[in-house]
Image (tube, helix red, strand yellow):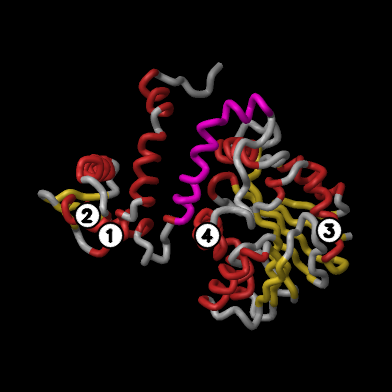
Amino acid sequence: MDSFDWDPAELLNLSGGYWSTCALHAGVSLGLFPALAAQPRTVAELAEEKGIPERGLVMLLDALTAMQLLEKNVERYAMTTSATRYLDPASPEYLGHIIAHHHHLMSGWARLDEAVRSGGPIRDRVSHDADEEQRENFLLGMFDLGMLLAPRVAAAIDLSGRQQLLDLGGGPGTYAIHFCRRNPQLRATIFDLPTTRPFAEQTLTRFDMGSRIDFVPGDFTVDPIPAGCDVAWLSHILHGEGRRGCVRLLQKTAAALEPGGLLLVQEFILQADRTGPLFPALFSLNMLLGTPEGQSYSEPELTELLNEAGFRQIERRPLELPNGVGILSAVKS
């Protein structure tokens, strides 16, 4: 018996849902939200400022108003309160970078059928070879998302007895920063690609953490991982690798940890039969589109990978996080 009874309207809303997505992406890409955050504007004023024709602009502004991201008063458009909170770059809760990253992914998702037929990726991963704007949106988008979760995670995990944290593939260092803020005795090392360094250094300066957190450039898939840590944090790293790649990376991380060192793995975690939650299941397709072997993993699969890499005392931390995010901890034998 079906657990959900689709009707034609719901199915068609699902099929055409990308229309709203594209309207949001266009508003971010065209810089409409920052312009309207400054003050309400007419179509003519925005068209002149942005150098674009009024015909398409008024249609987009009206659609964004219908989506309750904007308000229209006579002929002037303004941001709604919630849109200002998340779409004004001056807001500490700004999500524009991750939305721009999602826009970059859309062309690949439109070719999902090709990826399923071929069994391999049809777009390039965001890397040191990526377009600078794409790389910036990805890294700052990861920072935006990290800022939503990192304070909760750092508050829930006791690192009071730990001295040196390794943030593997830590990007701008969001989690390293919050773990260190929560634990005054803790120091940290971010290990990531050289092109990530400017973003990490800007973030460390912003949070006054430059004296406690350093950045070591390298590619964790091929380069040695900095040793001497007693806790390692791997946030959304394993889903980019196949099973063998995960085990190799976990073994390298184990070699970097001191005896008794703590490993923390944060991932979008599938249930045992891999049919939910929804976001990890869809994210697995995102990895199909962009990686040769990456995928979302279930909790039993992650446990098996950790065991194979030599870790013990594996458990899932009791944290309720959005989008199927979960954290597993393990100890180096």
| Label pair 1/3, CB-CB below 8 angstroms | no
Query: Which mark, residue 252?
Result: 3
- Is most of the magenta stretch helix, strand or loop? helix
Q: Work out whether residue 82 can be spotted.
A: no
- Say left or right for 191 vs 50: right
Tell me the residue that label 2 is attached to.
Answer: 46
- Please name the amino acid that badge 2 sits on: Leu
Dot 3 crowding, Cα within 10 Å, few <14, some 14–19, many 20+: some
For discs 1 and 3, the disc positioned in front in the rendered view: 1
- Say left or right for 301 vs 145: right
Tell me the residue that label 4 is attached to.
Answer: 136
Query: Which mark, residue 35?
Result: 1
- Please name the amino acid that badge 3 sits on: Lys
Q: Earlier in the sequence, mark 2 or mark 1?
A: 1
Q: Quadrant of residue 300?
A: top right
> Disc 4 to disc 2, how far (Cα)?
26 Å
Q: Is residue 115 magenta?
A: yes
Give, as a single range, the part of the protein colored magenta.
97-118
